[in-house]
Image: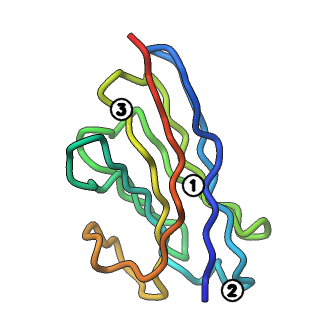
Amino acid sequence: QVQLVESGGGLVQSGGSLRLSCAASERTFSRYTVAWFRQAPGKEREFVAVITSVGSAAHADSMKGRFTISRDNPKNTVYLQMNSLKPEDTAVYYCAATSNFGWFRQRGEYAYWGQGTQVTVSS
């Protein structure tokens, strides 16, 4: 059972940056595909970015150029660097993991989820 813990959320002004972390308990975490999703109040949970075990990444079109996913396998951690934040980026951000390989963008592809971290961007 993979346990995921997100951190790094908080309150930031529009135009600011945050780096989210997703730490895993599983020592073979480097073999997992990991993604970030977000959910704003009253909205569906949406895909943000994904990174495979070999480090290839994909990002949602609306976040390309602002958000970057990366991973540090020795630390069993995946990051989401978020720059040029906007008020509409306000949401709870979740990391998710699967032992399957691929750039999965659907929630149902992921068996493991963290509890989420709140990101609030003020205007």
Q: Nearer the viewer, mark 2 or mark 1?
A: 2
Looking at the image, residue 117 lies above or below residue 106: above
Q: Nearer the viewer, mark 3 or mark 2?
A: 3
Q: Position of residue 17 (x, y in %)?
A: 55, 25
* 3 and 1 marks in contact (CB < 8 Å): no
Disc 1 packing (10 Å; few <14; some 14–19; many ≥20): some
Q: Position of residue 118 (x, y in %)?
A: 50, 41
Tell me the residue that label 1 is attached to.
Answer: 70
Is 41 placed left or right of 112 in the picture?
left
Quadrant of image for the N terminus: bottom right
Is 86 placed left or right of 71 in the picture?
left
Q: Secondary structure at mark 2?
A: loop
Q: Which label was assigned to residue 28?
A: 2
Disc 3 packing (10 Å; few <14; some 14–19; many ≥20): some
How far apart marks 3 and 2 lie (CA) works out to 31 Å
Looking at the image, residue 88 lies above or below residue 60: above
Q: Residue at x 43, y 15 (%)?
A: 122
Is 50 placed left or right of 12 in the picture?
left
* 3 and 2 marks in contact (CB < 8 Å): no
The quarter of the displayed image where residue 74 is located: bottom right
The quarter of the displayed image where residue 91 is located: top left
Amino acid type, residue under disc 2 in the picture = Thr
Amino acid type, residue under disc 3 in the picture = Asp
Colour setting: rainbow
Q: Residue at x 44, y 39 (%)?
A: 67
Q: Residue at x 67, y 71 (%)?
A: 24
Tell me the residue that label 3 is attached to.
Answer: 89
